[in-house]
Image (cartoon, grey):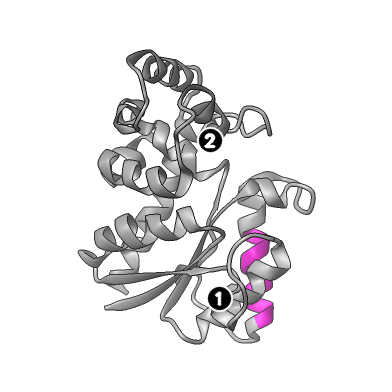
Amino acid sequence: MIRLAVSVEGQTEREFVKDVLAEHLRASGVEATPVLLGRARGRHGGGNVSTGRLVTEMAHLSWSFDAVTSLVDFYGFRRDVPGGPEALQERLFAEIKDRIGREIDREKVLPYVQRHEFEALLFSDAGVFADIPGASGESVRLLQDIRRQFPTPEDINDHSATAPSKRILGVIPRYRKVVNGPRLAGKIGLAVIRKECPRFGAWLTGLEALGTH
């Protein structure tokens, strides 16, 4: 079994890895463990995401695990890294390699940065929002309409006023990120999410492949 550390920026991502991603990856021979940013070095976890902090965290985790990846969104890095999440992933890999100070296997150090926040993945099947207490048929239809406006859920705007979570809260005020988010992702299922979200799908394929190395 390959031991994989997943550096996450918040409680929602941690619960998603623990309850959804880890179960899926075990079938591929990969045991995924979420680690809140900071917790790997005994510090307060979550929040305060920065390139330097994520590099330090992933480099530290690489000594204790067989492979390491991340689950963060691009929003907190925008001012530091031009070029989008792909450019940031390349920068993270290069800096992690320098920090470790030895040759590393590109296939086992997999920085992953989502284009927008976690809730974008939930638009892979907006019908699941009906499971949230207080959600009406009309609110679900509004979220389904939002999904149809974009090529993929990953393209849903991440402006401070129109981020995926803000769109959800705008029509379902009782949505709770940590409680509802991972549970709805599990209900949708990774097969649907990877089909609807190609960047996420490519990352998941890379994680599954760890079990073959």
Residue 154 in percent (x, y) is at: 50, 36
Q: Is residue 126 visible?
A: yes
Per the rendering, the mark at residue 165 is 2
Q: Work out whether residue 195 or residue 145 is closer to the camera in this orientation and state it.
A: 145
Count how many numbered circles sit on residues in the image: 2
Q: Amino acid at mark 1?
A: Arg
| Marks 1 and 2, the one that precedes in the sequence | 1
Contact between marks 1 and 2 (CB within 8 A): the answer is: no
Residue 135 in percent (x, y) is at: 37, 24
Magenta stretch encompasses residue 87: no
Residue at image x 31%, y 72%?
31
Q: Work out whether residue 22 or residue 62 is closer to the camera in this orientation and state it.
A: 22
Q: How far apart in space, not on screen, are marks 1 and 2 (Cα)?
A: 25 Å
Q: Badge 1, how many Cα within 10 Å: few under 14, some, many 20+?
A: few
Residue 105 in percent (x, y) is at: 49, 76
Disc 1 target residue = 39
Per the rendering, the mark at residue 192 is none
Residue at image x 24%, y 67%?
26
Q: Amino acid at mark 2?
A: Ser
Residue 186 in the image: above or below residue 56: above
